Image: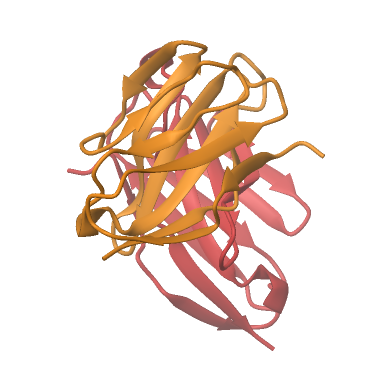
Amino acid sequence: EAQVTQNPRYLITVTGKKLTVTCSQNMNHEYMSWYRQDPGLGLRQIYYSMNVEVTDKGDVPEGYKVSRKEKRNFPLILESPSPNQTSLYFCASRKTGSVNYGYTFGSGTRLTVV
Amino acid sequence: QKEVEQDPGPLSVPEGAIVSLNCTYSNSAFQYFMWYRQYSRKGPELLMYTYSSGNKEDGRFTAQVDKSSKYISLFIRDSQPSDSATYLCALGGQGGSEKLVFGKGMKLTVNP
């Protein structure tokens, strides 16, 4: 089944404790992106990657890091999480240049930083 | 002015009603237009997409784009309780970018 898999689905952590949210897609998509979704603010892009070793900042990159060492994986790293990073996170991917320009989203990771 | 504005909702309708969801946008460079549906505790899923002004129909759903007015709509006919979800408009293709810009979403509840 074509899908984007995120782990974990739920995470509660303490301020300052480094964490990584994993994202993997099995569709050979070039483009991958991380979004956070907050009430009243909608989906905001954190980082994106056009292909392996090519990443760039989105609209709200502060406090986050990403890497793209393999085409299928695009982990999101919070080096020192803070309570304002409590949010619902989505990873998404799409094939560039395809007729269907839609993203395929993962099921989300609900992060709480206390 | 925000790039994409979506009616905030929430919206509650009886089963069988016709639903109209709307977004406006400010950047005329957007080339393609999408609607996503997001069920509770799930990721958004692509519902419809279109590239040009006019209507596109898929079953009970019709996507409408008016590029001259910078206005897009999603119509749901004969709405069902299973249509209860949050609907997000998404626009892309500006300057050849891969990025999608999303509306904030409207929560729709269809009551049996």
Furthest residue toward right? A1
| Coordinates of residue B37 in the picture (x, y in percent) | 59, 56
Furthest residue toward front? A17
Say which of A71 and B19 sits in front. Answer: A71
- Quadrant location of residue A53? top left
- Chain ID, red in image: B
Say which of A88 and A82 sits in front. Answer: A82
- Against B101, is A84 above or below? below
| Coordinates of residue B40 in the picture (x, y in percent) | 56, 68
Rendering colour mode: by chain
Looking at the image, which residue is at 48% across and 15% down?
A: A50
Q: Quadrant of the C terminus of chain B?
A: bottom right
Looking at the image, which residue is at 29% across and 30% down?
A: B27
Q: Is residue A34 left or right of residue A79?
A: right
Furthest residue toward bottom? B112
- Quadrant location of residue A76? top left
Q: Quadrant of the N terminus of chain B?
A: top left
- Chain ID, orange in image: A
| Coordinates of residue B21 in the picture (x, y in percent) | 49, 60
Looking at the image, which residue is at 59% across and 52% down?
A: A107
Say which of A104 and B35 sits in front. Answer: A104
Q: Is residue A25 left or right of residue B96?
A: right
Is any atom of residue B36 visible in this view?
yes
Looking at the image, which residue is at 33% across and 36% down?
A: A46
Furthest residue toward left? B1
- Against B10, is A33 above or below? above
- Against A60, is A43 above or below? below
Is any atom of residue B80 visible in this view?
no
| Coordinates of residue A29 in the picture (x, y in percent) | 64, 21
Say which of A76 and B97 sits in front. Answer: A76
- Against A110, is A89 above or below? above
